[in-house]
Image (tube, rainbow, N blue to C red):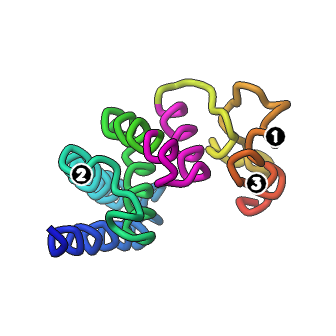
Amino acid sequence: MAHGVAALAAELTDMAAADHRTAVHANSDDPAEQLAWRRLTARHGDRLGEIMAEYGWPTAELVGEEGARAAWLIAQHADRQLDIQRRALQLMQQAVSAGAAGSRELAFLRDRTLVNEGRQQVYGTQIAGVKDGAPVPWPCEEPERVDELRAAVGIEPFDEYVARFS
């Protein structure tokens, strides 16, 4: 089993590395580059679905910190596979409750899934675009409480966060 888990950790980190290399194409003007990005994230989403079916959420205890972060990134980018994102969110929530995963990453995945469902986000982590040089978040459920909710899960204040996108 240990060899299988080591191979799984390596597979997850390899997928995350490929994601990082090609993420620049997600919003490319070239349709072929966009399609390549979609295909990559779909393949990764499918594989994450298989991994979750076999192992549950890939926690740091199972696949190491880097492998767990890679699994989260893959779930985060499975935007056209809501079933995978919802399953990851459910399993990650259980892992956070058990102290085996981070609430910060869970908050990002929760927002991403809500936005993909066409709903308002909670933590203001998802940016819709840029208008007049300023990042515009997707709508939030409780915009007046965003910084309080963010602080509770270890995310910097909204203004600091969006400054990175400017």
Label 2, label 3: how far apart the Cα atoms are:
35 Å
Q: Is residue 113 magenta?
A: yes
Q: Quadrant of residue 4?
A: bottom left
Q: Relative to the observer, which residue lies in front, 55 or 135? A: 55
Q: Nearer the viewer, mark 2 or mark 3?
A: 2
User: Of helix, strand and loop, which one carries label 3?
Assistant: helix
Q: Which quarter of the rendered picture does the N terminus lie within? A: bottom left
Question: Dot 2 corresponds to which residue?
Answer: 55
Which amino acid, mark 1?
A: Glu
Q: Decide: is 108 above or below 15.
A: above
Whether the residues at callouts 1 and 3 have beta carbons within 8 Å, the answer is no
Question: Dot 1 corresponds to which residue?
Answer: 148
Disc 3: CA contacts within 10 A as few (<14), some (14-19) or many (>=20): some
Q: Which mark identifies residue 162?
A: 3
User: Of helix, strand and loop, which one carries label 1?
Assistant: helix
Measured from the top left, where is residue 81 in percent x and y?
Answer: 32, 38
Measured from the top left, where is residue 143 in percent x and y?
Answer: 79, 31
